[in-house]
Image: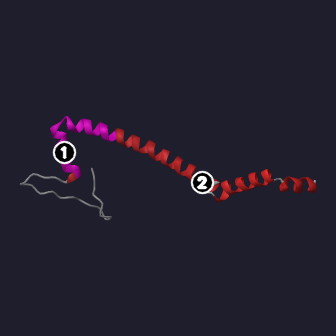
Amino acid sequence: MVNKILRLAKNFYFATGVGLLIWIGFFDANDIISQFNNSLKLGDLETDLVYYDEKIKEVEIQRQSILGNPRLQEKYARENYLMKKPNEDVYVLVNEKNEPIEK
């Protein structure tokens, strides 16, 4: 058994093949650990992609509803960008954590 393994290890092609497999598996830039980490990152990015696609759809629906109605445009600008008319004052109410209170 041991003689068989030694004879196989002395074979140039076998030793070269094993050396290449070890090099590719552990020392190369695309080794096994890097491939595993990249697959985990890919899964996270695909999850983020689904989340952001949903958010884009929500924003598009909101955009279509706001662009068609000037009254909604004014309401949106006042609430989100704190825009005001020249003769009025805007007060933002905040809680103890200095976050705006929304109705």
What type is the residue that disc 1 sits on?
Lys
- Say which residue appears at 18% left-offset and 49% top-offset: 78
The correct choice, above or below, for 63 with respect to 33 in the image is above
Q: Secondary structure at mark 2?
A: loop
Task: Give the image location of residue 6, x and y in percent.
Answer: 88, 57
Looking at marks 2 and 1 on the same chain, the residue that comes earlier in the sequence is marked by: 2
- Spatial CA distance of label 2 from label 1 is 53 Å
What residue would you read off at disc 1? Answer: 75
Q: Is residue 39 left or right of residue 82?
A: right
Q: Is residue 98 left or right of residue 38?
A: left
Q: Secondary structure at mark 1?
A: helix
Q: Which residues are magenta?
A: 58-80
Task: Give the image location of residue 79, x and y in percent.
Answer: 22, 50
What type is the residue that disc 2 sits on?
Asn
Q: Is residue 73 left or right of residue 88?
A: right
- Say which residue appears at 15% left-offset and 57% top-offset: 90
The correct choice, above or below, for 97 with respect to 45 in the image is below
| The one of 18 and 39 positioned closer to us in this rendering | 18
Task: Give the image location of residue 59, x and y in percent.
Answer: 31, 41
Task: Using a 10 Å C-alpha cutoff, classify the residue at mark 2 as few (fewer than 14 neighbours), some (14 to 19) or many (20 or more).
Answer: few
What is the count of numbered marks?
Answer: 2
| The one of 83 and 9 positioned closer to us in this rendering | 9
- Say which residue appears at 83% left-offset and 53% top-offset: 11
| The one of 50 and 26 positioned closer to us in this rendering | 26
The correct choice, above or below, for 38 with respect to 96 in the image is above
What residue would you read off at disc 2? Answer: 30
